[in-house]
Image: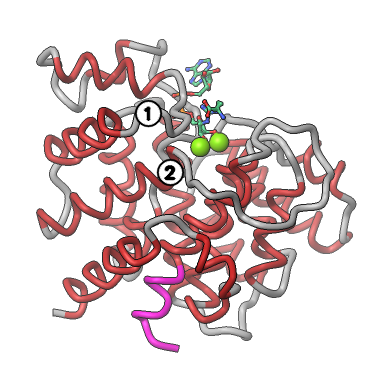
Amino acid sequence: MSLKQKFIGSLVGEGVGDSLGAGVEGFPHFFEVREPGARYTDDTHMMIGIAESLIKNKGFNGDDMAKTFIKHYEAEPWRGYGPGPPRIFALIKKGVSWDEAALKIYPGGSFGNGSAMRIAPVGIFYYNDQERLKDISYKSSKITHSHELGMEGAALQAMAVALAVGSEPPKLNRYEFLEKLNNFTSFDIYKKKLESIEILLEKKEERDRIIKDLGNDVLVFNSVPTAIYSFLANSDFKDAVTYAVGLGGDTDTIGAMTGAIAGAYYGIDAIPQEWKNKLENYEYIEKLAESLWKIKSM
Ligand code: F2R
Ligand code: MG
Ligand code: MG
């Protein structure tokens, strides 16, 4: 499969997963998931901002990325943003630097899942450069989520996307995938969750066990591992994303993160056509992924 198909698969996969979970965010767990809703939410909206800024600057520029987030938020504030980012945007507009504003909202910074949910463009763009992937994940996270667990969660999600780009279906070795993620992170909380994923996969556990051991709420260390599990426990794009959303809780976000990983692995052609047809701004998201791929291929 071509790299281009994987890049497009990841960004479209994010949008589709977000739209599928959007109408049921916060629902208690276990329900049948059917069709994506008409709209994506803040997850995809901010993912688009990251892609645009990486393309414009041919890499990371913190000031520009923050301004891009703010421009999008002001145009469409109704996309269901978390409580922190709009307050941080207001501070940046008042002149606080992009890498300092986030520290002023939550003590030690936010560890919500808002910087991991949007990180897919960093994962695909730096898929073959682990050091830069971590560095840029941390920097892009710092705009709104400056807690070390917030930045690490974004980096781990980016690394899962990167590993999926670098793996050719159907040959994924789930245990090697988890081992690479475990070697990537030095944080105990993430290492323990990755070890739990391995055990849960072996035992083929029920959904209530997955939620209990991994989590499905808005905190990044409870939703990135669940997205990774949802990808690894299922054998095609549709099943992975449907499973993730069906767990309930932060459905749009866990759906978006699972979709970004599964789309990077299975590629754009594996995403159901009727879901692609329904995705708002499909052509634009596809164009962003293609531009990232072109810069990467230069
Ligand atoms: N906002 C939502 N959903 C609410 C309803 C939307 C509704 N459907 C609508 O249309 O209006 N979803 C989005 O928010 C989540 C991402 O949030 P983000 O960007 O991480 O926000 P924030 O404020 O940084 O963190 C979220 C919560 O995490 C807790 N938290 C974070 N850091 C903390 C810290 N240091 N100490 C204690 N708690 C901390 C807080 O409870 C924050 O409120 C996604 O689900 C996205 O889809
Ligand atoms: Mg959302
Ligand atoms: Mg959400």
The boundaries of the magenta stretch are 1-9
Q: Position of residue 103 (x, y in %)?
A: 31, 16
220 drawn magenta = no
Which residue corresponds to the image point at 62% horizontal and 85% vertical from the top-left?
171
Q: Amino acid at mark 2?
A: Ala
Residue 137: image location, x then y, percent: 33, 46
Residue at x 79% of width, y 61% of height: 201
- Residue 178 or 288: which is nearer the viewer? 288
Q: Residue at x 72, y 66 (%)?
A: 239
Which picture quadrant has residue 29? top right
Vertical order, 70 against 171 (above or below): above
In percent of the image, x 58 and y 56: which residue is there?
A: 258
On screen, 245 above or below 202?
Answer: above
- Residues packed near mark 1 inside 10 Å, few (<14), some (14 to 19) or many (20 plus): many
Q: In screen coordinates, is 60 left or right of 80?
A: left
* Callout 1–callout 2 Cβ contact below 8 Å: yes
| Residue identifier under label 2 | 154
Horizontal and vertical percent for residue 150? 44, 33
Determine whether, in the image, residue 145 is placed left or right of residue 201.
Answer: left
Determine the secondary structure under disc 2. helix
Q: Is residue 2 magenta?
A: yes
Q: Is mark 1 within 8 Å of ligand 1?
A: yes
Secondary structure that dominates the magenta span: helix
State which quadrant residue 26 falls in: top right
Compared with 282, 4 (above or below) is below
Query: Is residue 158 toward the left or the right of residue 196 in the image?
Result: left
Q: Which residue is mark 1?
A: 145
* SS assignment at label 1: loop
Q: Quadrant of the N terminus?
A: bottom left
Position of residue 41 in the picture relative to residue 174 (left or right): left
